Image: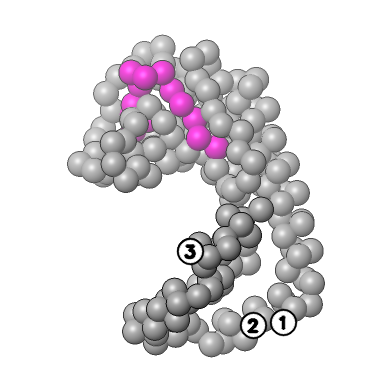
């Protein structure tokens, strides 16, 4: 359940976006609020952008009303769970010792933790040379970054591509952890 379901006083705002679940270019979201904060949010949004694209809103509304959206979500959840389980299984089989990862209950990403001395930016450079992209965790932290974490997205690639990419990435991790060497400086190193 969303925290908003427990809100009795109108202090919680629930925001949902359709861009990740329907279409990246959708740029339409929904907001659930109550009380005086709702009118303040409407005024702030109106001042900020003069409204969302009407065509996108009109296109999404019949999908939401028809039940197609719920069926789409069900298929999407099943596909993402299968991909997540595939990646977790591949990590269990191929990841070197000293590496751990999350098993998310939802979403699109698995967070991987290297030993504390390792730098995901170095691994990024090595993996990219092999044709595998990861996202070093330092790009996702608002304050003190943890340089030994990175993110694997399992939402974009199909099962076949993930089946090739994850063992390849694990091989790069194994090589890096056995012979850590400073790599070229990535563009976000000043972050």
Residues 175 and 2: in front is: 2
Q: Nearer the viewer, residue 39 or 110?
A: 39
26 lies above or below 144: below
Residue 116 located within the stretch drawn in magenta: yes
Q: Can residue 4 be seen?
A: no
Q: Position of residue 147 (x, y in %)?
A: 33, 30
Tell me the tag on residue 59.
2
Mark in front: 3 vs 2:
3
Say which residue appears at 43% left-offset and 34% top-offset. Answer: 150
The answer to which quarter of the image holds residue 67 is: bottom right
Q: What residue is shown at x 42% (from left), y 41% (from top)?
A: 135
- Provide residue 36's location: percent of width, then percent of height: 45, 77
Local SS, label 1: helix
Mark 1–mark 2 CB contact (< 8 Å): yes
Where 44 sits versus 121, above or below?
below
Q: Circle 2 — which element?
A: helix
Which residue has dot 1 on it?
62
Who comes first in sequence, dot 3 or dot 2? 3
The segment highlighted magenta reads 110-122
Seen at 56% across and 70% down, the residue is: 32
Q: Left or right: 34 with respect to 162?
A: left
Crowding near the residue tagged with mark 2, few <14, some 14–19, many ≥20 C-alpha atoms within 10 Å: few
Residue 14 on image: x %, y %: 54, 64
Mark before the other along the chain sequence, 1 or 3: 3
Q: Does the magenta portion include 53?
A: no
Do residues under tags 1 and 3 come within 8 Å of each other at their CB atoms? no
The residue tagged 3 is 11
Front residue of 117/49: it is 49
Gap in Å between the C-alphas at discs 1 and 2?
7 Å
> For the residue carrying disc 1, how many other residues have a C-alpha within 10 Å: few (<14), some (14-19), or many (20+)?
few
């Amino acid at each position: 359940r969303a925290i908003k379901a427990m809100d009795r006083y109108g202090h919680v705002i629930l925001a949902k976006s359709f861009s990740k679940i329907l279409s990246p270019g959708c740029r339409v979201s929904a907001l659930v609020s109550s009380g005086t904060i709702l009118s303040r949010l409407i005024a702030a949004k109106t001042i900020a952008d003069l409204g969302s694209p009407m065509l996108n809103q009109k296109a999404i509304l019949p999908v939401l009303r028809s039940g197609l959206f719920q069926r789409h979500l069900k298929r999407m959840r099943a596909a993402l769970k299968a991909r997540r389980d595939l990646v977790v299984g591949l990590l269990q089989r191929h990841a070197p010792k000293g590496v751990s990862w999350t098993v998310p209950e939802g979403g699109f990403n698995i967070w991987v933790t290297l030993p504390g001395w390792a730098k995901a930016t170095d691994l990024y450079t090595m993996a990219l040379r092999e044709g595998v992209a990861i996202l070093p965790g330092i790009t996702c932290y608002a304050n003190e970054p943890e340089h030994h974490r990175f993110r694997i997205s399992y939402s974009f690639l199909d099962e076949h591509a993930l089946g090739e990419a994850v063992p390849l990435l694990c091989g790069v991790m194994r090589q890096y952890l056995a012979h850590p060497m400073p790599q070229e400086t990535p563009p976000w190193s000043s972050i």
